[in-house]
Every structure is written in C-alpha cells, then in structure tokens.
Amino acid sequence: MEFDFDFRRLVLLALLLGGFALLGGFQRPNVPTGGIHSSTHVNKAWSYCVVLFIAGAVSATLIEHTVGYMDPTNLRPGYIVLGLLMMTAAVFWLHTLKGSVKRQEKTVGVSASLVCVRACS
C-alpha cells in the first residue's frame, strides 16, 4: 500500500474535505447543560465522525495498492468503495448526532421555561 499524491487526487481530497466543512462537519455541536447528553460524550462522538470522514476521504483518493508479482492486481477500486462507505457513514452519524443535540436543546429550553414559570408564579 502506498500513497499517490497526484495533483488531481489532492484536488479531489480538498473538494471532499471542503464539502464536509460546508455541511458543518468541522463545527462541534453545542450541547446545552442539564440534558441527557454530556458534552464530553458528544464531543467524543463528533471527533470520531470527523476522523471517520477524513480516513474515508484519504482511502478514496490517495491510496494506491497493488498485489502480486507476475500479474499484479490493483486493489484501488476496493479502497474507493471502502472510502465512500466510510464517508457516507460519517455524514449520517454526524447528522443523527446533531439532530439529537438539537432535540435536546428544544427540550431543555422548554423545561427551563416551565421551571421559570413555576418559580415566578
């Protein structure tokens, strides 16, 4: 297995990482206090999502792997498929994580306003 830093592959890697950044992948979710999720666990899951996406992007773009001496076989198509699966899993995982945190924000906001209404009256 070796890395091929061809200009086209580097541009494709930059486009993939830029698209992930446009989707908000490199922004940590804001976890409100007092909810069911702790910020430590959410940040850990977010960092795993980012690592999974970057590893998938590198696998799909930069890795070149040939096996055999007499009739060498190129394993690059397998690395491309593996990279696409990893990137897809990371995007879905991140979307689910951010959706869960967003639902928690709404729940915490509603419960905080109810506590204020009860305490104020």
Image (cartoon, rainbow, N blue to C red):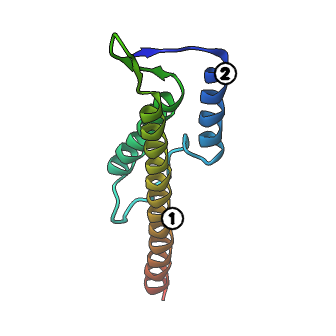
Q: Amino acid at mark 1?
A: Lys
Looking at the picture, how far across and down is residue 40, in whole percent?
33, 47
In the depicted structure, whether residue 39 falls above or below residue 60:
below
Q: Nearer the viewer, residue 69 or 13?
A: 69
Looking at the picture, how far across and down is residue 19, in whole percent?
64, 41
Residue displayed at 43% across by 32% down: 79
Looking at the picture, how far across and down is residue 114, in whole percent?
46, 82
State how far apart marks 1 and 2 are (Cα): 38 Å
Secondary structure found at label 2: helix
In the depicted structure, whether residue 3 falls above or below residue 49:
above
The residue that label 2 is drawn on is 8
Dot 2 alpha-carbon crowd within 10 angstroms: few under 14, some 14 to 19, many 20 or more: few
Secondary structure found at label 1: helix
In the depicted structure, whether residue 35 falls above or below residue 61:
below
Q: Amino acid at mark 2?
A: Arg
Kindly report which numbered mark, 1 or 2, lies closer to the viewer in this rendering. Answer: 2
What label does residue 102 carry, if any?
1
